[in-house]
Image: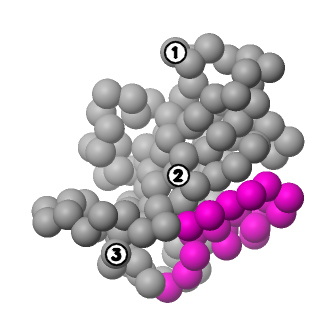
Amino acid sequence: MAVRAVRGAVQLDEDQAAHMDERVAELLTAVLERNGLTQEDLISIWFTATPDLHSDFPAAAARGLGIVDVPLICAQELDIEGAMPRVVRILAHIESDLPRSEIAHVYLGAAAALRKDIAQ
């Protein structure tokens, strides 16, 4: 079993805790499903949020999904002029037999424009 990394992102419509929980849960669920993973395959997850998001920690959505024994950390994205607003990104470290070329990186909605080269 190899250690792999999965990227993903989602843009929020508004900075509200319940909305963040919903959208981040949607992103995490899609990452797991599209890569044939279970919570047992997760090693750790890094979350970043753009500086305009203040309502909650993105990791709280993972805990709400029952991901309680996986190390999680939140950080703030760089405040770059012209960057897409209200974005939560993830970098999940996983155990998987999938080759790197078959890892499904998940960019939902408008966030797909962030990485057209790897978004599926």
Judge whether 84 appears above or below 35 on screen: below
Towards the viewer: 55 or 23: 55
The residue under label 3 is which amino acid type? Answer: Pro
Where, quadrant-wise, is the N terminus in this rendering?
top right
Secondary structure of the residue carrying tag 2 is strand
The residue under label 2 is which amino acid type? Answer: Ile
Q: CA distance from mark 3 to mark 2?
A: 15 Å
Q: Earlier in the sequence, mark 3 or mark 1?
A: 3
Residue 65: in magenta span: yes
Judge whether 37 appears above or below 63 on screen: above
Secondary structure of the residue carrying tag 3 is loop
What residue is shown at x 64% (from left), y 52% (from top)? 45
What residue is shown at x 62% (from left), y 14% (from top)? 99
Residue 84: give x, y in percent of width and height. 25, 60
Q: CA distance from mark 1 to mark 2?
A: 18 Å
Towards the viewer: 43 or 53: 43
Q: Crowdedness of circle 1 by 10 Å Cα count: few (<14), some, many (20+)?
A: few
Where, quadrant-wise, is the C terminus in this rendering?
top left
Q: What residue sits right under mark 3 in the picture?
A: 51
The segment highlighted magenta reads 55-74
Q: Crowdedness of circle 3 by 10 Å Cα count: few (<14), some, many (20+)?
A: some
What residue is shown at x 40% (from left), y 33% (from top)? 119
Residue 20: give x, y in percent of width and height. 53, 72
Q: CA distance from mark 3 to mark 1?
A: 32 Å
Residue 42: give x, y in percent of width and height. 76, 43
Q: What residue sits right under mark 1 in the picture?
A: 101
What residue is shown at x 70% (from left), y 49% (from top)? 44
Q: What residue sits right under mark 2 in the picture?
A: 90
Q: Quadrant of residue 67?
A: bottom right
- Residue 22 visible in the current orientation: no
